[in-house]
Image (cartoon, rainbow, N blue to C red):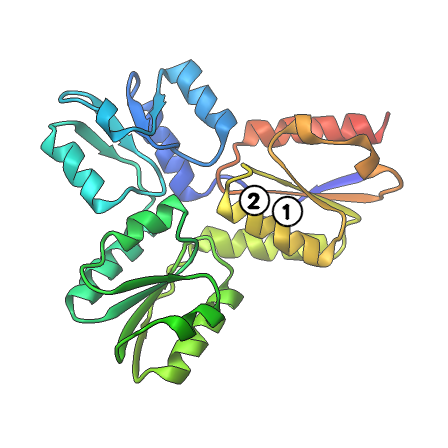
Amino acid sequence: MKIELAESYGFCFGVKRAIKIAEDNRNSATYGPLIHNANEIDRLKNDFNVALSENLDTFRAGDTAVIRTHGIPKQELTVLNERNVNVVDATCPYVTKPQQICEEMSAQGYDIVIFGDETHPEIKGVKSYAVGNVFVVNSPDEIDALRLREKVAVVAQTTRKIEDYQLIVGKLMATHKEVRVFNTICNATFDNQDAVRKLAKKADVMIVIGGKNSSNTKQLHAIAKEFCPDSYHIESQDDLQSDWFAGKELCGISAGASTPDWIIDDVVKKINLLANA
């Protein structure tokens, strides 16, 4: 069986930047998981003594708090600064952008519509920057229930599919006089989704590697499954099953933006062993 990696996969710019920031701040703690990959978080803990805290109250004056790539709510950032915590911001610049847009456009009197998952940490942070009406939707159907004024500004979660965002925008354009649209889906998301789509069309089996709670990895897996029914979302080599590869000729591999190369390498080695057993 042949193994082929997607043309674009794995660590994006924002994740690489965040990990470098964490490694440069030994003996610190991240507020919330730095990225959606438990194995990489364990590596930072073991090799650089970068702890993980999900409780704001654990940080005291003089502590170093590394802000997760997904960002945090504005009010929580204010609390950390007021406590004289040494705040090191590892928020991805692609996430900072919709935060700024929400703050600026809402201050100008626009209602804000965010396309994304309201429970996701990125969206919790982005939403907190709006100073007026702000709504989070996951599908075009949800727009009907919103009580929006005429001026609307819309942003998207950075890891969403552009085709789904276009449906949201189209619905708003059809029902409102003034709609300001900001394409806040990051380039790495575009590239990885295009690459997994291309590979899945010719693969017999697809393996998509990334955290189970990683939004962008879930999107990659959904795209892969559209074109290759035998597509599996795994976190590490331990999740692989030998029967997935029986009778297969081409195994395609992609990985989410929070998946480090060492995990991908381990998966490729394990697949080779299973396929040739």
Residue 95 appears left or right of 270 = left
**Residue appearing at x 21%, y 46% in the figure:** 74
Query: Most extreme residue toward the right, as rendered?
Result: 247
Question: Is residue 142 at all visible to an observer of this figure?
Answer: yes
Q: CA distance from mark 2 to mark 1?
A: 6 Å
Quarter of the image where one finds residue 53: top left
Mark 2 nearby-residue class (10 Å; few <14, some 14–19, many ≥20): many
Residue indicated by mark 1: 6
**Residue appearing at x 48%, y 57% in the figure:** 160
Residue indicated by mark 2: 9
Residue 143 appears left or right of 107 = right
Element marked by disc 1: loop
Residue 180 coordinates in the image, percent (x, y): 30, 73
Residue 115 coordinates in the image, percent (x, y): 41, 62
Residue 100 coordinates in the image, percent (x, y): 23, 56
Three-letter residue code for mark 1: Ala
Residue 36 appears left or right of 181 = right
**Residue appearing at x 76%, y 48% in the figure:** 230
Of residues 67 and 54, which is closer to you in this image? 54
Mark 1 nearby-residue class (10 Å; few <14, some 14–19, many ≥20): some
Element marked by disc 2: loop
**Residue appearing at x 39%, y 77% in the figure:** 172
Which numbered tag is attached to residue 138?
Answer: none
